[in-house]
């Protein structure tokens, strides 16, 4: 249990640090595209194009963040094999706390009292969960359920990609929720994956859950990148937490045999609900307040980067408010 908790905590640290670095890289790329007044940066619906997402992915901040994400993925996968999913996924989702703290330095964001209070709530809930968690389930399931997991992963990622391109800049929350469901499917896939213990490569490659992990992991990362590029990153992250925590936690109990210690079910439920609510509150209260523009500023745009007129309103305001922090981190 202790090793599993340490592993999940390390995964959370990697994910939290990686998210901030990816946000810095995404915003730097968005500013550069806006400065060039590039018409190829957005789809006809106002969302980021594949080319703009690719350009964001080649900034050094984003690449370093992605490396940390891969390390976090490996550690998270290991934690999912050692802990009940309602515990491992919740600890990993606490990367919001790390993201919030690092944002003070890298994104020049000052945390408010409600944010600090939300962080304290998350930490307290994690203590409750760790105290109440019992042994993880076996993870042995019929192969048909592995196929259903693969189908669900394809539907989530494929449908999410299509909807994001159709809804454009209005899809930040949706992209966050679907990326969270993708990461949740990844966690479930790791738990049920055949050919791991003992290691048997043919069984591993022949398991549909292996391909569900690839689809959900890569697709979830893409949708998360899109959510970082279009408005309300904090709201999108809150939706991600719900998707990657609630669904896997429920499936772990109902499907995989995860359980709490005898007599501690109430504490596990309380800790789970409070942890998710606290994580959502961290993201919600972290939404930056944008001062309204004056008529002169709207006319002349002195506070904006060149080409701001081509950017969605929420993204333009958010970048203006956080440009100094992003630039100081490598921009």
Image: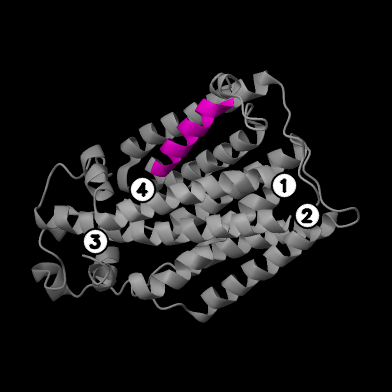
Mark toward the viewer: 3 or 1? 1
Q: Position of residue 326 (x, y in %)?
A: 27, 67
**Residue 316 numbered mark, or none:** 3
Taking the image as drawn, is residue 1 in sight?
yes
- Using the numbered discs, state the Cα–Cα distance from disc 3 to disc 2 in whole angstroms: 44 Å
Mark toward the viewer: 1 or 4? 1
Mark toward the viewer: 3 or 2? 2
Mark toward the viewer: 4 or 2? 2
Vertical relation: 127 (above or below) 237: below
**Bounds of the magenta span?**
209-221
Q: Residues within 10 Å of mark 2 (few under 14, many from 20)?
A: many
- Using the numbered discs, state the Cα–Cα distance from disc 4 to disc 3 in whole angstroms: 17 Å
- Callout 2: helix, strand or loop? loop
Query: If the image is split into quadrants, where does the N terminus sit?
Result: bottom right
- Using the numbered discs, state the Cα–Cα distance from disc 3 to disc 1 in whole angstroms: 42 Å
Confirm whether the magenta stretch covers residue 127: no
Q: Residues within 10 Å of mark 1 (few under 14, many from 20)?
A: many
Residue at image point 61% right, 24% down: 200
In-image side of 307 versus 172 (left or right): left
**Residue 84 numbered mark, or none:** 1
Vertical relation: 119 (above or below) 316: below
> Is label 1 in contact with label 2 (beta carbons under 8 Å)?
yes
- Callout 3: helix, strand or loop? helix
**Residue 225 numbered mark, or none:** 4
Marked residue nearer the N-terminal end (1 or 4): 1
- Callout 4: helix, strand or loop? helix
In-image side of 41 versus 171 (left or right): left
Quarter where residue 197 is shown? top right
């Amino acid at each position: 249990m202790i090793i599993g908790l340490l592993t999940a905590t390390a995964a959370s640290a990697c994910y939290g640090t990686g998210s901030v670095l990816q946000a810095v890289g995404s915003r730097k790329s968005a500013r550069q595209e806006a400065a060039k007044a590039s018409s190829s940066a957005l789809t006809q619906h106002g969302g980021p194009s594949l080319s703009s997402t690719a350009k964001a992915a080649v900034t050094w901040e984003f690449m370093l963040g992605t490396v940390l994400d891969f390390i976090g993925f490996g550690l998270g996968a290991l934690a999912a094999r050692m802990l009940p999913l309602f515990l491992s996924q919740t600890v990993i989702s606490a990367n919001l706390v790390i993201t919030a703290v690092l944002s003070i330095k890298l994104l020049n964001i000052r945390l408010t009292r409600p944010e600090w209070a939300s962080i304290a709530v998350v930490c307290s809930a994690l203590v409750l969960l760790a105290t109440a968690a019992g042994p993880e389930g076996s993870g042995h399931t019929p192969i048909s359920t592995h196929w259903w997991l693969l189908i669900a992963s394809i539907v989530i990622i494929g449908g999410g990609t299509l909807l994001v391109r159709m809804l454009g800049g209005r899809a930040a929350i949706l992209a966050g929720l679907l990326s969270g469901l993708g990461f949740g499917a990844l966690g479930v896939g790791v738990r049920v994956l055949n050919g791991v213990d003992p290691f048997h490569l043919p069984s591993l490659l022949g398991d549909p859950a292996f391909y569900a992990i690839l689809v959900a992991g890569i697709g979830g990362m893409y949708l998360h990148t899109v959510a970082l590029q279009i408005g309300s990153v904090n709201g999108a992250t809150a939706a991600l937490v719900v998707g990657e925590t609630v669904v896997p936690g429920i499936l772990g109990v109902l499907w995989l045999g995860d359980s709490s210690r005898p007599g501690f079910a109430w504490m596990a439920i309380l800790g789970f609900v409070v942890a998710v609510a606290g994580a959502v509150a961290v993201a919600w209260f972290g939404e930056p307040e944008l001062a309204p523009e004056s008529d002169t500023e709207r006319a002349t745009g002195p506070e904006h980067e060149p080409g701001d007129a081509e950017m969605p309103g929420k993204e333009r305001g958010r970048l203006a408010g956080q440009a100094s922090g992003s630039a100081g981190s490598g921009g």
